[in-house]
Image: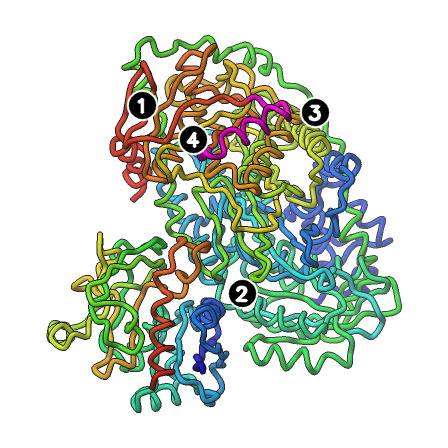
């Protein structure tokens, strides 16, 4: 086959091209021809097709995501905002923290182990590319029904992949979630988050400036794995993916899911950090989705000049790869750096020290074009911005689905409630033993949470927390939350409830919430109902972030999470990052001392729509989710942080799915102490135990601090109700029932191993 | 008067910085050692830290044992240099035959990370002098290839000579024969164990216990008083 050079393309304008098989629409192909003034070469077509895919271009979501910038609250903490590999926030003492959550949903369904593993690898390189040392990871996960046979295929593979990759990198896994729901059966959600730390002066950006600077590709060799992974996997449903694979036979039938090598990534991390420390790079970009197509076009379009790349110099695992395949390959563990010529030798020395292959593949040029050559012949000549940033933008139609009213009218508050104390007790045990409420230790014990020796809090705590300075005890905390059931009932409120819960979790640990990253998991944007959910959720999140003063610093959108006509619940997963000046002041969830007083903060109302109780006891989803009050969330957060800093509370646990009884059960089991609870005046026992009203937390207060604490709450107008005391070896609800911790523990800890081990 | 404790970094070592920190907290002078460097920089003791050196490729520890630094470590360990192998470090020590036996994949085939209770069986090694025989301690355990295995004769020898240094309590996490968590050589200068004492040296961090600090204070006392 002759090489499709730029000249050849100009000479043969009418040659048919597989744009459709590569996932492009007819008007998009026409637009490429218009940009170039000729038909694209095969290599150019490959680049445009991956970069204009939904995954890389955000073409359906872009118009909605703009709100995160437009409505961003004024924040002194923001150092780098949306648009870079990850946002960066100031956490004080000269430190900056970068963090982000991304999805690897579709690959993880096809190949659970490698899909999840490379999800971790990708987010870690994003963080590394900002100039930061990665210090922790978190993994929010969603699977189909816990007892479905396919969950047994997907979940163990995903968990082993996250552990196999993350453990080998030496990054403590400090949080995340595991949620089961039948709606995720064919579309599990594997989101991965990472936190990195650096000094302010070490922030690096993805740009190629300075004509004559060298472009260096370093890390793993390029192979045939993951070719077209982005466009095929992330942008169409699986049905369409299999169609295109069997269609023209192009791209070739290699594994579309990338294969990870965590050992190579560990070397890449240490090597890159040493390169940063010696200030050897002018710009840097990791290679993830869309591989070299993405890295070269993004680096070049962010810089001041053009770029010339000799593609045949790229080290290969498979010498038969075509230039198109090299450009599209998503082989893992690769980075691309722009280096001044006099620093290249030292750059190479450091790579050699770490046994990392590094190759000069091109240089920054005076021009404005991205030019790629293959054995001396030009195969790409494009304006880089047209590839990286000028992809299509869709104003997808959206409409509130017809069924939304009926769903909201199906009020969960009207469901039959337990009639006797015995029934109430039985439902408590059923709740804590349900897969979503049960202990996830079987999963999280497969992740290393101790490595690096800075882990202050890790799952099942409300938030993960790591120390970032050993002298000053400065630390950061992160929580991720998202409740697809709430979001299904009301996507606007659901997104805000996810934000509020994550914010509350960070505050409950004693850290001050600073900034937000999100991973927006939805069905097909071509369905107006899904697009409405997306529009509502982004609007809710943007409004919520403005109200709480926590800007969105970056994130990720995953669409097409649906099987046939059935979409997943809209699932915005929100990560909140917080800072704590002194980690010794952190607040754990465990009730560790008998005699301490239990206080409930916030208001409890009859709110059961989307609740765990309605799911576990009635298999029901309907009504409205709990009311959102972001001013209250802010006040609650301030109280929790002050109480932590001033030593007024020994434990705090946020109240969310499962309500008060779930939180108290977890805190009791964690501390090995029981609790005596009294139903407050004005509430019935059922509402007291199971309501999921937002803006609440339960705290354990030492008797010596009781007055000071309640005075503070009173003075600042936060409702505070004494609900009992840490006592004995059982949870006793006065006048109703008692359950020994041993029985609760069996219910809470037995479920997941029984289903999965 | 203090002592210099070296910690070797192989490609893929993860807990090197933790071990250096533990040495420092114990009062020793921590020294970084590099796998390609035969020079041990005149350290008084060496820690082989945890991690996945060389990605555990071929077999955990199998490639690291051939690194230049290990030539010197093997030679000097035979002459009495105190060496502690933690997790992957223990695996490397068995590959070098400084310690007998081998580690197989955990019997449930999963990576396991948890707080693990141990009994100190031998408080006379270079690394356990600050403990008392029979003392129970808790330190983090985290590995996938942690199932200690050796032939019956070797196991009997280890038992008879008091060379089983640590045993798992409250449940064997990985199927290790005779609940063995760590062993020592006959001279007591080379000790290996799968759990991670370097992760249990500060009251705030990890499990919140400091039961692992004794390894580092033990060696320091021994070196300083020698």
- Disc tally is 4
Residue at screen point 76% across, 75% down:
A376
> Is A712 within the magenta?
yes
Tell me the subunit letter for badge 4. Answer: A
CA separation, marks 4 and 3? 38 Å
Q: Foreground mark, 4 or 3?
A: 4
> Is A245 within the magenta?
no
Percent position of residue A260, x then y: 50, 60
Lateral position of residue A475 relative to residue B107, left or right? right
Q: In this view, does B40 lie above or below B114?
A: below
Percent position of residue A423, x then y: 30, 14
Earlier along the polypeptide chain: callout 1 or callout 2? 2
Q: Foreground mark, 1 or 3?
A: 1
Could one spot residue A41 in this view of the protein?
yes
Quarter location, residue A530: top right
CA separation, marks 4 and 2? 38 Å
Earlier along the polypeptide chain: callout 1 or callout 3? 3
Quarter location, residue A309: bottom right
Magenta highlight range: A701-719
Q: Name the residue under label 3.
A: A398
Marks 1 and 2 share the same chain: yes
Residue at screen point 40% across, 32% down:
A437
Within 10 angstroms of label 1, few (less than 14), some, or many (20 or more) residues? some
Tell me the subunit letter for badge 1. Answer: A
CA separation, marks 3 and 2? 41 Å
């Amino acid at each position: 086959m002759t090489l499709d050079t730029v000249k050849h393309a100009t000479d043969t304008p009418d040659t048919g091209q597989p744009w459709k098989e590569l996932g492009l629409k007819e008007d998009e192909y026409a637009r490429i021809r218009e940009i170039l003034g000729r038909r694209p070469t095969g290599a150019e077509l490959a680049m445009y097709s991956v970069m204009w895919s939904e995954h890389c271009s955000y073409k359906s979501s872009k118009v909605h995501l703009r709100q995160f910038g437009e409505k961003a609250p004024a924040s002194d903490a923001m150092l780098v905002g949306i648009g870079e590999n990850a946002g960066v926030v100031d956490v004080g003492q000269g430190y900056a923290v970068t963090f982000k959550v991304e999805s690897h949903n579709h690959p993880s369904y096809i190949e659970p182990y490698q899909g999840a593993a490379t999800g971790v690898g990708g987010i870690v390189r994003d963080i590394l590319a900002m100039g930061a040392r990665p210090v922790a990871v978190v993994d929010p996960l969603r699977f189909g029904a816990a007892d479905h046979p396919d969950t047994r295929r997907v979940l163990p593979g995903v968990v082993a992949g996250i552990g196999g990759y993350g453990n080998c990198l030496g990054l403590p896994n400090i949080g995340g979630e595991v949620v089961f729901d039948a709606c995720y059966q064919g579309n599990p959600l594997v989101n991965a988050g990472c936190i990195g730390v650096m000094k302010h002066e070490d922030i690096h950006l993805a740009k190629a400036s300075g004509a004559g600077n060298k472009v260096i590709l370093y890390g793993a060799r390029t192979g045939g794995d993951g070719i077209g992974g982005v466009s095929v996997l992330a942008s169409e449903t699986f049905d369409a993916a299999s169609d295109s694979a069997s269609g023209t036979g192009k791209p070739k039938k290699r594994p579309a899911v990338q294969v990870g090598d965590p050992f190579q990534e560990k070397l890449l991390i240490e090597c890159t950090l040493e390169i940063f420390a010696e200030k050897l790079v002018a710009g840097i970009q990791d290679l993830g989705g869309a591989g070299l197509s993405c890295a070269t076009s993004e680096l070049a379009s962010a810089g001041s000049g053009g770029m010339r790349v000799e593609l045949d110099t790229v080290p290969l695992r498979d010498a038969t790869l075509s230039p198109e395949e090299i450009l599209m390959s998503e082989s893992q563990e690769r980075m691309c750096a722009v280096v001044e010529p006099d620093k290249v030798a030292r750059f190479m020395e450091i790579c050699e020290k770490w046994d990392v292959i590094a190759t000069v593949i091109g240089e920054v040029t005076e021009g404005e074009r991205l030019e790629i050559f293959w054995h001396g012949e030009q195969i790409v000549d494009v304006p880089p911005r047209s590839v990286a940033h000028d992809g299509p933008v869709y104003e997808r139609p959206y409409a509130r689905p017809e069924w939304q009213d009926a769903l909201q009218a199906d009020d969960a508050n009207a469901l039959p409630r337990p009639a006797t104390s015995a029934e109430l007790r039985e439902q408590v045990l059923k709740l804590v033993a349900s897969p979503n409420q049960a202990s996830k230790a079987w999963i999280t014990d497969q992740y290393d949470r101790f490595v690096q020796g800075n882990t202050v809090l890790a799952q099942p705590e409300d938030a993960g927390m790591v120390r970032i300075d050993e002298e000053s005890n400065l630390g950061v905390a992160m929580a991720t939350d998202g409740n697809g059931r709430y979001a299904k009932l009301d996507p606007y409120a659901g997104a805000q409830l996810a934000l509020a819960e994550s914010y509350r979790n960070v505050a409950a640990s004693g850290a001050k919430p600073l900034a937000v990253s999100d991973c927006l998991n939805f069905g097909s944007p071509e369905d107006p109902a899904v697009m409405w959910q997306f529009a509502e959720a982004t609007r809710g999140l943007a409004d919520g972030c403005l109200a709480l003063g926590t800007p969105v610093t970056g994130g990720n959108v995953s669409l097409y999470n649906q099987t046939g006509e059935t979409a997943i619940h809209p699932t915005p997963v929100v990560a909140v990052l917080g800072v704590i000046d002194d980690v010794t002041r952190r607040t754990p969830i465990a009730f560790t001392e008998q005699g301490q007083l239990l206080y409930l903060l916030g208001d409890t109302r009859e709110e059961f729509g989307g609740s765990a109780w309605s799911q576990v006891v009635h298999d029901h989803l309907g009504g409205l989710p709990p009311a959102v009050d972001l001013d209250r969330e802010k006040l609650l957060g301030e109280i929790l942080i002050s109480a932590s800093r001033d030593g007024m509370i020994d434990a705090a646990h946020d109240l969310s799915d499962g309500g008060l009884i779930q939180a108290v059960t977890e805190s009791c089991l964690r501390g090995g102490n029981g609790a005596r609870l009294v139903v407050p005046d004005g509430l019935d026992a059922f509402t007291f135990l199971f309501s999921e009203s937002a803006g609440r937390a339960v705290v354990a207060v030492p008797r010596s601090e009781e007055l000071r604490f309640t005075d503070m709450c009173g003075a600042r107008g936060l409702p505070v109700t004494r609900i009992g005391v840490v006592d004995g070896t059982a949870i006793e609800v006065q006048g109703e029932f008692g359950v020994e911790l041993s029985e609760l523990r069996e219910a809470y800890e037995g479920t997941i191993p029984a289903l999965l081990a | 008067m203090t002592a210099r404790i070296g910690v070797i970094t192989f490609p893929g070592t993860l807990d090197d910085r933790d071990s250096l920190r533990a040495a420092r907290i114990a009062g020793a002078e921590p020294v970084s050692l590099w796998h390609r460097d035969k020079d041990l920089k005149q350290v008084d003791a060496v820690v082989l830290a945890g991690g996945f050196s060389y990605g555990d490729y071929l077999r955990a520890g199998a490639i690291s044992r051939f690194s230049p630094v290990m030539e010197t470590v093997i030679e000097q360990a035979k002459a009495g240099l105190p060496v502690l192998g933690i997790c992957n470090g223990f695996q490397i020590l068995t590959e070098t035959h400084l310690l007998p036996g081998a580690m197989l994949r955990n019997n449930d085939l999963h990576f396991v990370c948890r707080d693990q209770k141990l009994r100190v069986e031998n408080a006379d090694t270079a690394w356990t002098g600050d403990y008392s025989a029979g003392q129970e301690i808790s330190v983090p355990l985290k590995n996938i290839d942690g199932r200690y295995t050796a032939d019956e004769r070797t196991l009997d020898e280890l038992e008879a000579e008091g060379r089983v240094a640590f045993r798992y309590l409250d449940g064997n996490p990985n199927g290790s024969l005779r609940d063995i968590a760590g062993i020592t050589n006959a001279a007591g200068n080379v000790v290996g164990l799968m759990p991670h004492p370097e992760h249990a040296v500060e009251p705030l961090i990890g499990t919140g216990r400091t039961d692992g600090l004794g390894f580092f204070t033990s060696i320091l006392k021994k070196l300083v008083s020698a």
